[in-house]
Amino acid sequence: MSHIPLAHPAPTVLDVEASGFGRNSYPIEIGFVLPNGHAYCTLIRPETHWTHWDAQAEATHHIPRALLVERGLAVPDVARTINAQLAGQTVYSDGWANDYSWLGALFDAADMSPAFRLENLRALLDDQQADQWHTVKALVSSERGVQRHRASADARLLQLTLLRLRHGP
């Protein structure tokens, strides 16, 4: 967990890394950054029936399944923790359809419901900002230097990109 103060208010941004794409994929890491800049990230220990594994996804996120089994938190613990930290908030994701599905798998397995609402980050952008999104995101990414492709680092990049689009450098 880390905290970087932000000069302007920002929405909570969440990112999910997963075992792959498609029907049998599941969340393996969840990270988010709160409006105050506090970041949270955790690995998720797969449920016994979560067996789908995509080598291409692993090549992207660099999280081997063995690491999840060894160091991941149990699904109910992850669901309780993120609910406690995100309760009542609207949380934004740039991969809304996939992240919604993976959060659904997490909360279903925990036999719980999310205490927050997940929305598409695109809803926060006007047309001009949406047109500039990828360019500004690449610029912010290059300014930050090499970062691990992990959920909280990705969420922070999304939040910083949104702030840059809204307020400039």
Image (cartoon, rainbow, N blue to C red):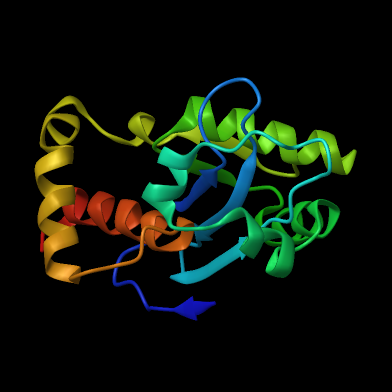
The answer to whether residue 10 is seen in the rendering is no
**Quadrant housing residue 104:** top right
Q: Which residue is drawn at 35% across and 65% down?
A: 148
**Quadrant housing residue 103:** top right
Quarter that holds the C terminus: bottom left
The answer to whether residue 151 is seen in the rendering is yes
Q: In this view, does 66 lie to the left or right of 10?
A: right
Residue that protrudes farthest toward the right in the picture: 111
Q: In this view, does 114 lie to the left or right of 55?
A: right
Q: In this view, does 23 lie to the left or right of 128?
A: right
Could you tell me residue 94's position as x and y percent? 39, 37
Q: Residue at x 41, y 39 (%)?
A: 56
Q: Count the marks: how many? A: 0
45, 31: nearer the viewer: 45
Q: Which residue is drawn at 55% across and 57% down?
A: 64
50, 113: nearer the viewer: 50
Quarter that holds the N terminus: bottom right
Q: Residue at x 56, y 65 (%)?
A: 41
Could you tell me residue 105's position as x and y percent? 73, 33
Could you tell me residue 68's position as x and y percent? 66, 59
Could you tell me residue 149's position as x and y percent? 37, 58
